[in-house]
Image (tube, rainbow, N blue to C red):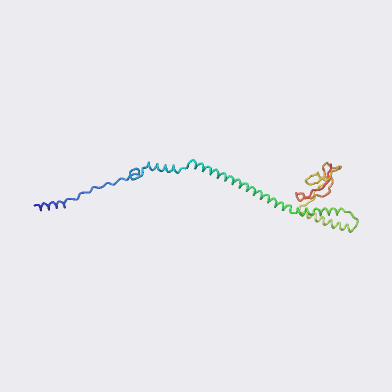
Amino acid sequence: MEQGEKQVMEQATYDEPEREQPIEEEAAPQSEGESGGVPLEEAGGEEAAELAEKAPTAEELAAAKAQIAELEAKLSEMEHRYLRLYADFENFRRRTRQEMEAAEKYRAQSLASDLLPVLDNFERALKIETDNEQAKSILQGMEMVYRSLVDALKKEGVEAIEAVGKPFDPYLHQAVMQAEAEGYEPNTVVEELQKGYKLKDRVLRPAMVKVSQ
């Protein structure tokens, strides 16, 4: 009997259906503000604190402004220096160009100045009067040389300064005497004692003259 009941109990145990296991519900995602994350308010506070730490102090701002002002002053000084150097360079270029033009324009000045005494000697010699035919022939040859020399200088721009009958000009004339002269206005050249010459618009030698009072 006992053995039969035991078999029935075991059979009932095997035949009993398996119990269903309870299904676990999926956990809902937690927000950052919930447990397991950093609260939003706390995170915002940390960022604000970090920005506050990085913000420049009043001393740093003042130092930065002073450095900016110093750099601006240096820049302004460099600009003024550049403008001065540029102006000096332009002046140098202008002077160089003018000197080159003057050297080209008055290239014959040194030679012409050296030849003026030669012209004076020729003119003195040609004023000599003689009846000797041989002397006259020599004077004619000298006059030809003199004319050739004058023409050569004229091609370079050398010309005699007009004096007699002209108003006295201290730039062109050198007054060495004053005298009363009929037929002349006061301060007028009445006699030329030595010829003057000019090279284009530059006076090589003023004319030595006598001026009326």
Q: Looking at the picture, tell me which residue is in the foreground, 190 or 95.
A: 95
Image label count: 0
Dividing the picture into quadrants, the one containing residue 167 is: top right
**How far across and down, in percent of the image, does residue 124 sit?**
85, 53
| Location of residue 189 by image quarter | top right
- Drawn side of residue 179 relative to residue 34, left or right: right
Nearer to the camera, 20 or 68? 68
Q: Position of residue 17 (x, y in %)?
A: 18, 50
Q: Residue furthest left?
A: 1
Query: Farthest bottom residue?
Result: 134
Furthest toward the front, the residue is 59
Q: Is residue 132 above or below residue 192?
A: below
Q: Position of residue 151 (x, y in %)?
A: 79, 54
Q: Position of residue 91 (x, y in %)?
A: 66, 48
44 or 169: nearer the viewer: 44
103, above or below 55, in the image:
below
Q: Name the residue furthest right.
A: 131
Left or right of 138: which side holds 199?
A: left
Quadrant of the frame with the C terminus: top right
